[in-house]
């Protein structure tokens, strides 16, 4: 199986704290990979690096797209060093001027947040339309005059939005403000919104947090559908171990910013280092 | 109370207020999207007054004399150059400070404001400039010596202001670009994560704000006929007040605040004292903010957890 995402020795420091220390991992295409670890292990920081929130200080994050590899870290620009030569410097300068987090999204990485970040004042369907912004006719004049091209592109976007609303079962609530939805519905809407940018990789940050057991079951079905039906690769941070063990193909365990174990759910469960990280250990 | 004086002052107040509202939109949109107060916005308006005079001169050179054509073409000319100015200011003075302390762009804005004032003073001279009256004629109500009037120019101002606000409202509420603006306003980072180039959206907002300031600049200049390099300051402060009064960050609030401020000013000037009209306008602002700290249509700020 080919890997869609490859992290090569990613490091990130905040002052004296080493949040991520040479993290390397590979995510197989069309798989569900879970990242677990105790609180403060650097899981969300890792997500922030992958989705372009933070720029990793060292290492590369490679996204495989058809035959092309994109370095997600390079899209964010960076400080120009003389030792690297003029060509690399110019590249960094250009990405510094025009690059940014939005380019990471455009290369096919979507994410959801631990604390839900919907556009609460917009309607449910508008939230899904925003995510399709890239694929739309955004010409101001065309929009203002409601030209045929604009109408067609809006209609396509609406159709896709409603398709997703049906998948997550919110079709009836399309025009209510997103902030008024129940917690579980907001979580599912956030996943649908992330899917609307046509991602190849979707990063879910604790999607089951705060859900009741029934909603968690529905969630695991939805996550599996993302992989099997929509062929996206799923990267998920989760604390609910039964959910993690039941859905993941592959698990990566982080502790203190380092990868301490990776493998199939069975392998990870049996790994003594993982048990030590979670439960503590007698030996010193 | 004299009915005709009241009518006259209401007309004057509406005219004044709708121009305040147009300029206030620039303050309120920029505040909404990046949380800074663009103190250079008044100067952008001032530049558009000069562009009006330049535009009229150029058109006169080409022998165009139809007043409506003159107004229309001057408006287009002023809008194009003023929005370019607005976008340029954002690019050069504010975007490099995007990640800096919140106060840094504020200081930068004051700097831009001084630069524009001084540049215009040096290049155009410090004395008052004037443009000819293009549209003559008034609409009068009442008898020979007891009447109130609305000039055709005043009517044009009110109609154009309403039209501009309606267009803006449509763009923000019903187009894909407006949707991106609203999303960026609510959560800039999230908008980026969804692939929206928020820098472009912010530049667009500065462009729109400057375009509306240009509309106001052309209208006011044609109405009063005279201006100097310092008009931006007072008008800017008034428009900012209007934005705060209506609830900064709210589009309809800016228009409402502008009209209320204009009416308050002109009614006070008409019935009490024209020397203290500004005092009254600001006292009204203080009074309203005591009872509604977030402005008339503003939403109370909720601390994000």
Image (tube, rainbow, N blue to C red):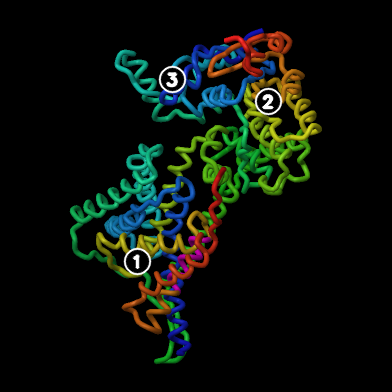
Image position of B253 (left or right of A211): left
Q: Residue at x 45, y 83 (%)?
A: B140
Dot 2, how many residues are within 10 Å of its Cα: few (below 14), some (14-19), or many (20+)? Answer: some
What secondary structure is found at the residue carrying circle 3? loop
The residue labelled by disc 3 is A57
Q: Nearer the viewer, mark 3 or mark 2?
A: 2
Give the answer, above or below, for where B173 lies relative to B141.
Answer: above
Instruction: Output the chain of dot 3.
Output: A
Residue in front for this viewpoint, A124 or B143: A124
Frontmost of labels 1 and 2 is 2
Distance between the alpha carbons at the discs numbered 1 and 2: 67 Å
**Pointer 1: residues within 10 angstroms few (<14), some, or many (20+)?**
many
Query: In which quarter of the view is residue A90 placed?
Result: top left
Query: For the residue labelled by badge 2, is the local secondary structure a helix, a strand or a loop?
Result: loop
- Label 3 – label 2 distance at C-alpha: 27 Å
| Residue occupied by mark 2 | A239
Callout 1–callout 3 Cβ contact below 8 Å: no
């Amino acid at each position: 199986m080919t890997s869609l995402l490859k992290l090569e020795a990613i490091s990130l420091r905040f002052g004296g704290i080493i949040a991520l220390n040479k993290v390397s991992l590979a995510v197989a295409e069309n798989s569900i990979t879970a990242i677990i670890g105790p609180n403060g292990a650097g899981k969300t920081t890792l997500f922030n690096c992958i989705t372009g929130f933070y720029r990793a200080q060292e290492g590369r994050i490679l996204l495989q797209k058809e035959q092309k590899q994109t370095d997600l870290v390079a899209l964010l620009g960076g400080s120009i060093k003389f030792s690297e030569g003029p060509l690399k410097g110019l590249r960094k300068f250009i990405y510094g001027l025009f690059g940014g987090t939005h380019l990471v999204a455009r290369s096919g990485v979507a994410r959801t947040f631990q604390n839900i970040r919907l556009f609460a004042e917009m309607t449910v369907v508008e939230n899904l339309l925003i995510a399709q912004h890239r694929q739309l006719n955004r010409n101001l004049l065309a929009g203002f005059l409601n030209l045929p091209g604009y109408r067609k592109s809006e209609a396509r976007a609406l159709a896709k939005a409603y398709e997703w609303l049906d998948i997550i079962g919110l079709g009836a609530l399309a025009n209510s403000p997103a902030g008024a939805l129940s917690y579980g519905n907001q979580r599912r809407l956030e996943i649908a919104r992330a899917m609307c940018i046509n991602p190849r990789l979707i990063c879910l940050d604790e999607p089951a947090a705060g859900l009741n057991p029934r909603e968690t079951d529905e969630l695991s079905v939805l996550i599996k559908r993302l992989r099997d039906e929509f062929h996206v690769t799923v990267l998920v941070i989760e604390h609910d171990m039964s959910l993690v063990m039941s859905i993941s193909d592959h698990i990566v365990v982080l502790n203190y910013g380092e990868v301490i174990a990776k493998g199939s759910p069975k392998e990870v469960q049996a790994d003594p280092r993982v048990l030590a990280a979670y439960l503590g250990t007698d030996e010193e | 109370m004299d009915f005709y004086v009241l009518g006259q002052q209401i007309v004057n107040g509406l005219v004044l207020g709708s121009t305040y509202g147009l300029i206030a939109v620039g303050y309120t949109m920029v505040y909404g999207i990046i949380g800074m107060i663009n103190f250079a916005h008044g100067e952008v308006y001032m530049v558009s007054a000069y562009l009006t005079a330049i535009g009229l001169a150029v058109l006169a050179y080409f022998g165009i004399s139809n007043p409506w054509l003159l107004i229309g073409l001057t408006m287009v000319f002023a809008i194009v150059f003023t929005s370019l100015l607005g976008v340029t200011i954002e690019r050069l003075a504010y975007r490099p400070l995007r990640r800096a302390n919140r106060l840094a762009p504020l200081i930068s804005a004051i700097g831009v404001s001084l630069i524009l004032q001084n540049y215009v003073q040096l290049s155009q001279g410090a004395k008052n400039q004037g443009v000819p009256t293009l549209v003559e004629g008034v609409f009068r109500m009442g008898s020979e010596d007891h009447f109130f009037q609305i000039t055709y120019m005043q009517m044009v101002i009110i109609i154009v202001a309403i039209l501009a606000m309606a267009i803006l409202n449509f763009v923000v509420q019903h187009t894909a670009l407006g949707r991106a603006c609203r999303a960026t306003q609510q959560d800039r980072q999230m908008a980026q994560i969804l692939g929206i180039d928020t820098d472009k959206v912010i530049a667009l907002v500065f462009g729109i704000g400057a375009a509306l300031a240009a509309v106001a600049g052309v209208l006011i200049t044609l109405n009063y006929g005279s201006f100097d390099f310092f008009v931006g300051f007072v008008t800017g402060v008034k428009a900012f007040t209007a934005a705060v009064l209506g609830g900064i960050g709210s589009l309809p609030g800016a228009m409402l605040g502008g009209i209320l401020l204009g009416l308050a000013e002109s009614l006070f000037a008409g019935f009490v004292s024209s020397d203290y009209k500004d005092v009254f306008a600001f006292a009204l602002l203080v009074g309203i903010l005591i009872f509604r700290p977030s402005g008339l249509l503003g939403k109370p700020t909720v601390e994000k957890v």
